[in-house]
Amino acid sequence: MTDSTQSVLIVSDDPEFRAEVIFAFPQDVKVSLARDAREAWSFMIDEVPAVVCIDIQSGSAGGFGLSRDMDATDRLSHVPRLVLIKRPQDAWLARQSGASAYRVEPVETGELVATILSLTNSPALS
């Protein structure tokens, strides 16, 4: 298993969002991308990221389910999660999924990165 202190996983089925956000992080942060919950889960079999950013409506399996599954898995339940929602009314979905934080889309890229980095106590990501 890889050290997670500099690893962020972004889960979104939006190719433009993935392309934009990957370049917004500091160079010493490893950013991995997944299109949906299944791809994210496959990634997390081998590597436990420091933080996961999940679009709640990602792909066929859904970000809500991914976050709930992470909560139910001992080796992943401690991983902070930022959940992206479409409407303020969906904040309860984020809370129900076990998210550490949520943001309503669209989110300015700089704000998104700052929020993700704030979710860990790791000096490398602070």
Image (tube, rainbow, N blue to C red):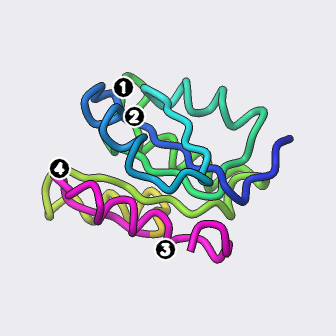
In the picture of the structure, the residue carrying the numbered disc 2 is 62
Question: Which residue occupies the foreground of this view, 88 or 108?
Answer: 108
Q: Secondary structure at mark 1?
A: loop
| Spatial separation of the CA atoms under disc 3 and disc 1 | 26 Å
| Spatial separation of the CA atoms under disc 4 and disc 2 | 13 Å
Q: Secondary structure at mark 3?
A: helix
Q: Earlier in the sequence, mark 4 or mark 3?
A: 4
Residue extending farthest right: 1
Q: Are marks 4 and 3 in contact (CB under 8 Å)?
A: no
Residue drawn at point x = 28 percent, y = 36 percent:
17
| Spatial separation of the CA atoms under disc 4 and disc 3 | 22 Å
In the picture of the structure, the residue carrying the numbered disc 3 is 118
In the picture of the structure, the residue carrying the numbered disc 4 is 86
Q: Which mark is residue 51?
A: none
Q: Residues within 10 Å of mark 3 (few under 14, many from 20)?
A: some
Q: Are marks 2 and 1 in contact (CB under 8 Å)?
A: yes
Q: Which mark is residue 59?
A: 1
| Left or right placement of residue 90 versus residue 21 in this view | left
| Spatial separation of the CA atoms under disc 2 and disc 3 | 24 Å
| Spatial separation of the CA atoms under disc 2 and disc 1 | 6 Å
Q: Residues within 10 Å of mark 2 (few under 14, many from 20)?
A: some
Where does the image place residue 33, in percent across and percent down from the top left? Answer: 50, 33
Is residue 116 part of the magenta span, yes or no?
Answer: yes
Where does the image place residue 101, in percent across and percent down from the top left? Answer: 40, 69
In magenta, the rendered stretch is 101-126
| Left or right placement of residue 6 versus residue 33 in this view | right
For the C terminus, the quadrant is bottom right
Q: Secondary structure at mark 2?
A: loop
Q: Secondary structure at mark 4?
A: loop
| Left or right placement of residue 1 versus residue 25 in this view | right
